[in-house]
Image (cartoon, helix red, strand yellow):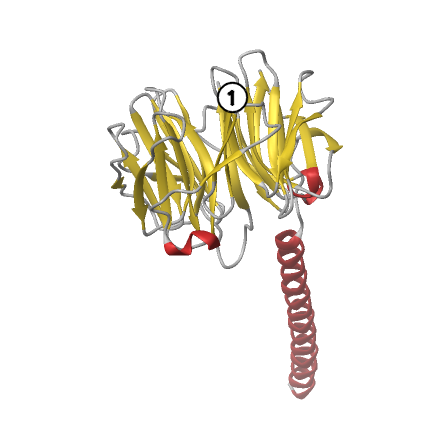
Amino acid sequence: MIQGLSFYKINKKILLNCAYSKKKEMIKKYIALCILTCVQIFYYGCQRNHAEVHYTTIELNSACNFYSMHKDSTGAIYVCGGNQDRGVIYKSTDYGHIWKVYSDSYSKQIYDFAILQDGNLIASSGDLELLYSTTKGKGWKQVIPSDRPKTGHQSEMYKISRAPDGAFYFCGGEKLYDGVIYYTTDTLRTLGFAHRNHEIRSMHWLGNHAIAVGYGAILYSETMNNDWQFANAPDDFYTGSTSHKNIFYSCSFNGGIYQSYDFGKNWNCINGKNRLTGKRFFYNCMALQNQHGVALGNDGSVATTSNYGTSWNEAYSFDNADINCVINVYDNLWIAAGDDGKIFRFSF
């Protein structure tokens, strides 16, 4: 009996030691697994996935930044920009392979421009300046609106948009502050004006309907007389706008992509904006062509869609460059341009 009891105590001690050893080993494995998981979360959270974007880089003029692109009826493509000392417009007639100077005669950057039917040009620049050229950009006449806000010298005129009735609209404002929308029906001889409490970065027309998007707000208009209403839209810094069929789209500097099915009155988010942890994308511009579309921005931020904007895939590309404008050339060939004089031809 005593021997049996001793045997039981010995075995119990051995079993307890084994259980303790296994528990200790399991704790070590659990701690190791936790450390590995944290490392993986940190690694993949910081890792930049590269988009399946096939691109070629053209370093055109490192002394300037590019802001807007357009395509004329012949298929020629134009890009404008510059710096504080010079405004430039480049032109390509071979789908963006070779670029030649079209205009470099203005004394500060050109944010946007439009070619009129008679071949003359209108453009927008810093300090809310509007420009007019009858010499295809070889010389410019400066137009400063008489009702320009007192902070006009601190503001930019970012985009030009043409309405279906032929009127031209100009939008801009002071960074992250007040905004303006001008329009003209007689090539800048007279100007209509609307002041807004939100800087306006982009405008887009869809028939007689228009949207103007900017810092903290989206505006919509159902008339062509510069009458704007606030849309029901999430709070965000909207930067780009486009449309497909009867749907408006907008992107934001906080990584959001939004759409409106009722001509800009109400908006819903289809691609969530940045969070404190996780995604970090910054969009400045967007465009759609048939089922394909892109939103591009700072640090090589790229969002692509191949299903008419229903869903978007995000990644990084373009050598992490800052992209300010994009245009579809044909089918799934696109051209983007941005800071440091870089132009990218790409497809996805």
Amino acid type at circle 1 is Asn
Question: Seen in the image, is 174 located left or right of residue 296?
Answer: left
Residue drawn at 63 percent across, 61 percent down: 38
Q: In which quarter of the image is residue 203?
A: top left
Which of 226/207 is in front? 226
Q: Residues within 10 Å of mark 1 (few under 14, many from 20)?
A: some
Where 341 falls versus 114 (above or below)?
below
Which of 109/22 is in front? 109
Where is residue 298 shown, x and y percent of the image?
Answer: 59, 46
State the count of labels.
1
Q: Mark 1 points at which residue?
A: 120
Which of 108/285 is in front? 108
Question: Seen in the image, is 336 located left or right of residue 151?
Answer: right
Residue drawn at 28 percent across, 34 percent down: 226
Where is residue 230 shown, x and y percent of the image?
Answer: 26, 43
Where 43 falls versus 213 (above or below)?
below
Q: In which quarter of the image is residue 139?
A: top right
Where 103 falls versus 116 (above or below)?
below
Residue drawn at 59 percent across, 27 percent down: 137
Where is residue 169 shown, x and y percent of the image?
Answer: 38, 32
Residue 260 visible at all = no
Element at badge 1?
Answer: loop
Where is residue 146 shown, x and y percent of the image?
Answer: 36, 44
